[in-house]
Amino acid sequence: MRPTFPAGPATRSALYWLGLLAALKALSLVLMGQAVASALAGLAAGEPDWAGQMIPGLAGVVLRSLTVWGQAVAARRAALGIKEELRSGLLERALRNGTRGTGPADGGLAVLATRGLDALDSYYTQFLPALVNCAAIPLLLGARILFADWVSAVVIVLTVPLVPLFMVLIGRYTEDKVREAQSALARLSAHMLELAKGLPVLVGLGRASAQRRALEKISEEYRFRTMGTLRTAFMSALALELIATISVAVVAVFIGVRLVHGDMPLEAGLLALILAPDCYLPLRELGTAHHASDDGRVALAEVTSVTGAPEPRPLTAVRAGRPGAPITVSALTVTYGGRSRAAVGPLGFEAPQSRITALDGPSGAGKSTILGVLAGTIGDGGGTSVTGSVKGLDRTAVAWVPQHPVMVADTVLDEVLLYLSAHARNSRDRALTVDVARSCLARAAAGHLAAKHPAELSPGELRRVALARGLARIEAGATVLLLDEPTAHLDDESAVAVEDAIRRLRGQATVILVAHNDRTRALADHLVPVGGPAPDVPAAAVPGRQPL
């Protein structure tokens, strides 16, 4: 995989410092090699100069230690800065567009933002320094060897390219293995997330064992892919070590033959022989770092594809030209990336003004997707294709109650207050505003939860508080309320209270809801079949109901 780095101040600063430190590291190797070669040559001639060579040798040792430490610090700081930048961009994109419009599935996105980006530590602390060292150290050491012994320099120039050649050949094979392992991990995480979401239903239907077997199969596939990657990494490391060892041996043979015949000075031969292994060492380290940073490079490519993808655009909604106009959806089609079959549509329906409309159909028919399109959380782009038209809808006046609400305030009461208008929150009579928020909570059978932290709430309590937020938006001026399974996870008493709150909205707001519960669905004035014919519902259940 071609090395790519995010453009940013952290990366540029790291490259500058690593390049400077790599040059100083090469200088330290030359100082140490020169000192050792001179000392051994003097010893062989019977005139050792230990004192004269000790100072440059110690200077080289200290300089090399400082450069190794400096490269580690610069790379670590770069890794921390880059991870912070990428996580911020990824989180901002997910919060702005939702996980549907971000790219990977919910579980894959969570793994990418956590474990995936953590793999960049190896990418920046091992691969990046090794790459910079490869660009600087062999060149500088080769130049010094050229001045000492041109024959050894020629041998090194001819053999050094063999290392990157085999790195490329092995790397292309390893890249496919790593991509397969990452794909298996993404499937595993997505399956785990979906399993956690639907575990109560699966247990109730007796399907938990089948899902356990499917999970075991995916886990075994991930283990197999990972072990294959490790085997390839070990074999490639062995191949690079053999190439470097043989190349140094060739240099030693040429030096030894000429020393025997007296064709070169001993000091020059020793210097070339001491520096030759360090010409190959950065390339071998790059090969090792390449495999250690495979996960980081794949994660970086995925994050770049997510943050660089076109922004999803909500389906254009045309406001009503006259008061009391219905919401009209025409030729709505939604297709998620990677799927050939449309998740929704083409579908058309009409939701009368200030009445209750229910989207009716089997699970997986796309009812929640339709609400997401109307709310503007699912748009065209970012891997999702949305076509069609919506008329009579003002998204600034939409209250949205999703299946899985997320809350940000410290208490439930503060959470509901956020959904009242800015004028009401900043008015002098704050007590009146609080009373309105408490009234919304009471209508949603959640008045007793006002002082609780949202993290303490059960799924059913979260649903009721989410409905209270929607009612607060209606009190603040919203005219459309979108409800996705408002009575799910509720006991019978709470469900009756929620249904009563929804029923009272008739004539006050346009309500579009999704519900699998027959009693909740019976609140609707109109049913919209989605994904097939709607089940038979007695017309007497709701007087005047007319299926669309």
Image (cartoon, rainbow, N blue to C red):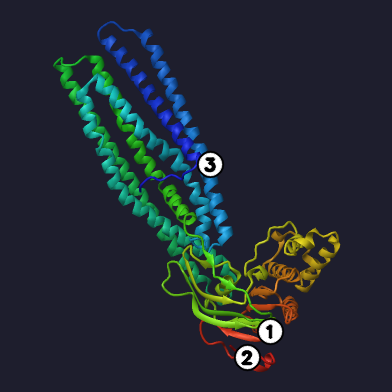
Considering the numbered disc 1 on the image, is that residue within a helix, a strand or a loop?
Answer: loop
Q: Is residue 530 visible?
A: no
Badge 2 crowding class, 10 Å Cα cut-off, few under 14, some 14 to 19, many 20 or more, is few
Residue at screen point 77% across, 65% down: 449
Mark closest to the chain's N terminus, 1 or 2: 1
Eyeballing the image, is 311 above or below 20?
below
Considering the numbered disc 3 on the image, is that residue within a helix, a strand or a loop?
Answer: helix
Eyeballing the image, is 442 above or below 33?
below
Dots 3 and 2: beta carbons under 8 Å? no
Residue at screen point 53% across, 56% down: 110
Dots 1 and 3: beta carbons under 8 Å? no
Residue at screen point 50% across, 49% down: 117
Residue 507 percent across, percent down from the top left = 73, 82
Instruction: Give the camera-side residue of 503 and 390.
Output: 390
Question: Residue 449 got which mark?
Answer: none
Q: Which residue is mark 2?
A: 546
Eyeballing the image, is 48 above or below 186?
above
Q: Which residue is mark 1?
A: 523
Tell me the distance, in whole angstroms, between the alpha carbons under discs 3 and 2. 59 Å
Mark closest to the chain's N terminus, 1 or 3: 3
Side of 160 relative to 228 (left or right): left
Residue 486 percent across, percent down from the top left = 67, 74
Name the front one of labels 1 and 2. Answer: 2
Question: Residue 81 got which mark?
Answer: 3
Badge 1 crowding class, 10 Å Cα cut-off, few under 14, some 14 to 19, many 20 or more, is many
